[in-house]
Image (cartoon, rainbow, N blue to C red):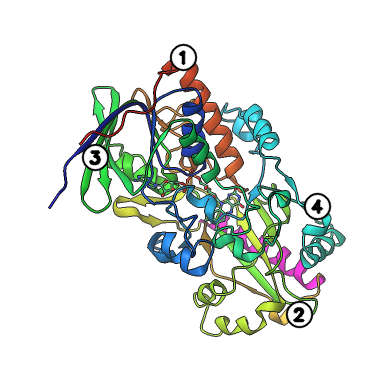
Amino acid sequence: MEKALTRAEVDVVVVGSGPGGATVARHLAQAGKRVILLERGTDHRERPYYGTHLGALIYADRGGLLFTEEGLNIVRPLMTGGATNMFTGSAARPPQWLKQKYGVDVDVEVEETIKELALDRLPDDALGERSTRIMEAANSLGYDWQPLMKFMRPSHTARFDCGAKCMLGCRCGAKWTANEYVDDAVAAGCELMTRARVDDLIIEGRRVGGVRGKMGRSARFEIRAGVVVLAAGGIGTPIILQNAGFFEAGHGMAMDTTTIVYGTSKYGGISSEPPMSVAYTDDDNGYMLSTLIDPWLLYPMINVLKGIKYPFTWFNYGKTMGMMIKIKDELSGGVSLEGRVSKPLTPRDRYRLNHASIVARKILVRAGCDPDSVFVGPLRGTHPCATVRIGEMLDQNLRTEVENLYVCDASCFPESLDRPTVLAIIGLGKRLGEHLLQDVLGGAASGGPAMPPVD
Ligand SMILES: Cc1cc2nc3c(=O)[nH]c(=O)nc-3n(C[C@H](O)[C@H](O)[C@H](O)COP(=O)(O)OP(=O)(O)OC[C@H]3O[C@@H](n4cnc5c(N)ncnc54)[C@H](O)[C@@H]3O)c2cc1C
């Protein structure tokens, strides 16, 4: 039986607590606005399974078995903090074309975030011995690899032990996640509702009036708000928009399509070293390379997709080096109702993947991998994005054609970033928060905490 309708009324409702939603909610709550943050997952951080393989099964969409129609595996964490729970903590400034081609300038917000979170490359002795070896091998071949800026703060923990397992969730406390911004927002008076899945929008004439959805399995809720910010991620946001009648949402997407090239080395593997501590970007050919290997149990599971013999390479896991390829993929496929995703590779995508694979193989062999052991793993996607694009469905302030309805997450990228996304998303969130304060809500605090839901 359906439970009672829960109603509330606030200044702003933010949907999704990943880096996009958490940043906007925090900014507005700290300015005294009445904000409700709705998150379809829950907070697993204090659970004993957080940061384990079991945990990843629990908070990844469909237990990690989300695939595109073409068979590409998508990792999509659904919990407070969104995908940053499972991200590798890499940071990159947004590409210059975002400003030059689309007029979206987040330089100030990005630099402020780098300072605020003390983002930096890891010190030399924390990069990892074998990762450093790979970087040196690459440099000796003429590829300019460098340590990557990280959302990892070795000084925040007594025991910095970042390795491949960081992608299950950080247990040592060094990795920043968007949960920190969610906590800040709540401390400033934002009301966080978890297990609250938004399904539809209330639209009155040309203006947004709020959102509707379900709490848990059956209780329905309706939140009325002057401003709605959708930040449910590259898959979640277009689904909500489609339900509300935006037929262009989710038509075409980017994924920064990814694979890992593996090889066995007598010098040992990289599983206990921080993921993506060193990297290389080839903007001309449209890809990024960095050091990465899956956590030990995921390694054989994912490589089953490559072919029956590949899971058995697990016996060499301790000696395996991995190099991740992330390509700047073209817009294709998209998201359709019920979250079905299609992401076919275009001929250009295939060319880029092959180009990058050849370079990765050369570097791994130079770093000491047995040439016969090198293979390219299955394709996957960790950056579903560009489904509600700036310049098409959104203006430069991230507003839709409906008044006071905004989008602030990876879905608003106009094209694939082909690099870590989170720093850019935080920049967009801060910029949107400030725009809403200055131009939409008025700078003054609303006074008082968010109104509690009324049954
Ligand atoms: C394994 C992995 C490694 C990665 N490594 C890096 C990295 O090193 N550096 C980097 O910058 N990026 C990395 N990324 C990508 C990065 O984490 C994502 O691009 C980023 O988190 C996207 O932010 P977002 O705000 O768009 O959405 P998300 O982080 O996906 O957050 C969306 C939130 O909305 C919630 N939601 C969805 N639908 C609804 C709904 N209907 N109602 C309410 N809530 C909803 C979800 O539960 C989720 O919490 C990685 C991602 C993965 C999966």
Contact flag, marks 3 and 2 (Cβ < 8 Å): no
Left or right of residue 97: residue 84? left
Q: Which residue is mark 4?
A: 123
Q: Which residues are magenta?
A: 346-366
CA gap between label 3 and label 4 equals 48 Å
Q: Nearer the viewer, residue 430 or 451?
A: 451
> Looking at numbered disc 3 in the image, what kind of residue is underneath it?
Phe
Labels 4, 1: front one: 1
| Residue 407 appearing in the image | yes
CA gap between label 2 and label 1 equals 64 Å
Find residue 59 and report its horizontal and vertical position in percent. Answer: 43, 59
CA gap between label 4 and label 1 equals 43 Å
Q: Which residue is mark 2?
A: 370
Q: Which residue is mark 1?
A: 444
Q: Earlier in the sequence, mark 3 or mark 4?
A: 4
Q: Which residue is mark 3?
A: 221
Q: Nearer the viewer, residue 332 or 80?
A: 80
Q: Give the farthest residue toward the right.
A: 140
Secondary structure that dominates the magenta span: helix
Q: Which of the 4 quarters of the picture holds residue 241?
A: top left
- How many C-alpha atoms fall within 10 Å of the one at disc 3: few (<14), some, or many (≥20)? many
Left or right of residue 443: residue 142? right
68 in relation to 90, above or below: below
Contact flag, marks 3 and 4 (Cβ < 8 Å): no
The residue drawn where x is 52% and y is 80% is: 307
Find residue 264 and report its horizontal and vertical position in percent. Answer: 72, 78
